[in-house]
Amino acid sequence: MLHGAIRMLVPEKRGSRLIDLAIFGAVVALIYGVTAAALSWLKPVGEHVEISLAPRALPAYAGYSLLRLAVAYLLSLLFALVYGYVAAYHARAERIMIPLLDVLQSIPVLSFLPGVMLAMVALFPTRQLGVELGSIILIFTGQVWNLAFSFYASLKSIPRELREAATVYRFNRWQRLVELELPYAAIGLIWNSMMSVAGGWFFLMACEMFVLGGRDFRLPGLGAYLQTAADAGDTRAILWGLATMIGTIVLLDQLLWRPLIAWADKFKFEQVESATAPRSAVLDLLRSSRALAQLNRNVLRPVGERVDLFFARRAKARAASSKAERSAVARRVEDLFLALIIALILYGVWRAALTLSTLTAVEAKLLVRSAAATLSRVAAALAIGVLWTVPVGVWIGLRPRVARFAQPLAQIAASIPATALFPVVLLALIRWGGGINIGAVALMLLGTQWYILFNVIAGAVAIPNDLLEVATLFGFGRVERWRLLILPAIFPYLVTGLVTAAGGAWNASIVAEYFRFKGETLMTTGLGATISRATDEGNFDLLLVSTLTMILMVVLINRLVWRRLYKLAATKFKLEG
């Protein structure tokens, strides 16, 4: 009581009041922006949306795009947590879910466009909400896969002693999730979240402005602004749009990602705190806010305790029920799910067999050569990406001061569509020699190297400081330091980066191997070129067969390579005592 009275008599610091006012203003502005956007989504569908190229329209367009990215990211994170959790803890489901995830990430985003947009417009034929949801789902398909792979890999690599401690303290599933699994996966999820949002910026132009049949779908946003400016050949507007996008990315980095990285540093699995831990001025200001402290003490903490109590009681009630009965029910559900999946696979195989029966010997040989050519380009892109991203990513991850300026630069570079740079790269290659063959590898590399870089940075950031000090204490040379500490520590993260980068490379082959330039079509032998050519010619049998061949290649590589590497990461290179 006396302490409370003294606090009431002592005036608050001026800095604290200003911080609270700034936070209150930001919350009010956010609520207003979301409400205004939501009201626009509920408006009747217009015949044609005009995209203004005036610079004064850019702040509103940036807000619309940010809202779509945020909603798509939240959906991606929720999907990744559920999907990764089920795949990590159910061995029978894992055998199907991980190869399926690899296949889905290899399908080009634009392949989802017709089905998604038609479905959403059919659900909401009279409201703008249908087109908005379609755009959000398309952005979701460009964000979700690396998050799911990251969470799955983190769960598989949790140290044994941490799991044993959770068992000793009798954690229920909810407690395991919030006290062990999410904290251990936090660093990987944050860095892959940055990559996911960068991927959202990457596909923004395609997701906010597209033609489907006789309808022209346009949504107010930065992507539509840039596409309209490009179509009009307005260089000034393009520069304004790019400057706004870069400014928004830098602002997001300072207000969101830097505070999250500094906050997640406490989840590193180490006993010795680093002397050069990442810092964030925004996080320091938030921690000094008395309003947020009171909100946490009076609202968030009591709600969290009630949620913990609810799940504890539920776990106790489940423990009292028959374990054998629960196991039998779980097995029946799994058997039903597997039977449904097998039935769908058998139906697909039967339909594919009917199509394959019409395939000529010449087309079969072409498919084999195309598959081998695309596989070699994917492997080359991954090899080149690893050669530069591993040393650079470790250099950034082990130096928080370097990460402060290198991280936003990497986000900006990852957000620039590779297809926008491809004509410049292709011109240089035609002039210097190499042409479309090397150009295809270059485009795959431009679009996929960032997945490896961000995961390597996350792996380097997560290396415990006490291990780094032990390596210094024992006088490890550069080679020993890399061989005995750095490479084993980042290996699980590197595998996740390679898997997502490989999916992106297969995805990019559709554009990289078949490119229209100055009124001409430049193409080379490959599955991507075969799929694009079959689409242009309306040869649906060849389109189906080539797509199935790509899926088969992805599944085989998953079984023969990625699955074994994940198993190796979860056993030999797991960080534990």
Image: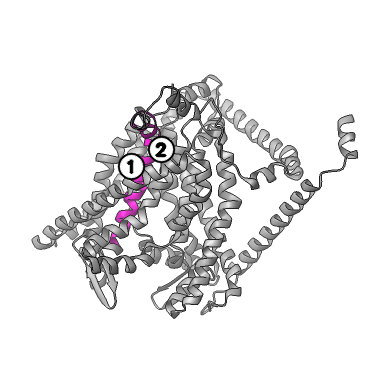
Pointer 2 residue: 153
Q: Tag 2, which secondary structure? A: helix
Front residue of 136 and 466: 466
Residue 147 against residue 32 in the figure, above or below: above
Residue 391 horizontal/vertical position (percent): 37, 42
Of all residues, the one furthest to the top in this rendering is: 168
Pointer 1 residue: 96
Front residue of 23 and 302: 23
Q: Tag 1, which secondary structure? A: helix
Front residue of 207 and 249: 249
Say which amino acid is labelled 2.
Ala
**Residue 567 within the magenta-colored segment of the rendering:** no
Front position among marks 2 and 1 = 2
Stretch in magenta? 482-510
Residue 269 against residue 453 in the figure, above or below: above
Question: What quarter of the picture does the N terminus occupy?
Answer: top right
Residue 521 showing in the rendered view: yes
Residue under the image location 55 percent in, 66 percent down: 244
Residue under the image location 28 percent in, 72 percent down: 516
Question: Of callouts 2 and 1, which one flags the residue occurring earlier in the amino acid sequence?
Answer: 1
Say which amino acid is labelled 1.
Ile
